[in-house]
Image (cartoon, rainbow, N blue to C red):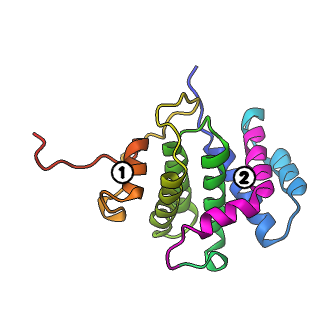
Amino acid sequence: MPVKSRRPARVAALRALYQMGIARVRADDAIQQIREESEMDAELVEYAERLVRGVATESSAIRDVIETRLTGWDYDRLAAVDRTILRVGVYELLHVPEVPPVVVLNEAVELAKKYSTAESGKFVNGVLARVMADFPRAATQETEEPAPETDEHVPEELVEQGSGEWEALEASGAMKPLRKDAP
């Protein structure tokens, strides 16, 4: 049986966490809203709840991870959607070992491109790539979730070849160096 995408659960978690951050909705109320309004199956609702509770519980540590990897940005001045996407991505990278880092990165970038600005995908990619470089996980781990199919790739100009970010992306399979001497 093919594995279904967890993207709907990530979107539901993103909306719940956004409400919690902007409107100061309690986690239990946001999760209850997911349960009542969602058309997702029980497994996806459970994953959305896992993300919401996990991000809320690990909020301080996640903020520290993000803040130390921002270059030229202040955490509190980040767009609320970008900040929320980063929080979910960092939580998944550090606390959800069954999801490969490349899937986390790809999903976060796709969410940023869909729900934020045109430049947000690049920004989220850069921050999460730094997190991946500092918290590497085995790129060969077993997974239940396939990497999303996409014709898009991470543009070379976003990450300097040879940097820690490049090495993390290359190790995860998200980035392959272009060889000029390749046939």
The one nearer the camera, 166 or 42, is 166
Magenta span of residues: 45-72
> In this view of the protein, can residue 82 be seen by the observer?
no
Residue 63 inside the magenta-drawn segment: yes
Residue 55 inside the magenta-drawn segment: yes
Tell me if 19 is positioned left or right of 99 in this view: right
Amino acid on which the number 1 mark rests in the picture: His
Q: Are marks 1 and 2 in contact (CB under 8 Å)?
A: no
Q: Which residue is mark 1?
A: 153
Does 46 sit above or below residue 72? above
Q: Residue at x 72, y 38 (%)?
A: 44
Amino acid on which the number 2 mark rests in the picture: Ala
> In this view of the protein, can residue 141 be seen by the observer?
yes
Q: Which residue is mark 2?
A: 13
Does 15 sit above or below residue 72? above
The one nearer the camera, 62 or 41, is 62
Spatial separation of the CA atoms under disc 1 and disc 2: 25 Å
- At mark 1, the secondary structure is loop
Residue 95: x and y in percent read: 67, 45
Q: Main secondary structure of the magenta part?
A: helix
Residue 178: x and y in percent read: 22, 49
Say few, some or many: other residues with alpha carbon within 10 Å of mark 1 (under 14 / 14 to 19 / 20 or more): few
Q: Residue at x 40, y 57 (%)?
A: 164
Residue 141: x and y in percent read: 52, 31
Q: Quadrant of the N terminus?
A: top right
Residue 169: x and y in percent read: 41, 49
Q: Place residue 97 in its image quadrant.
A: top right
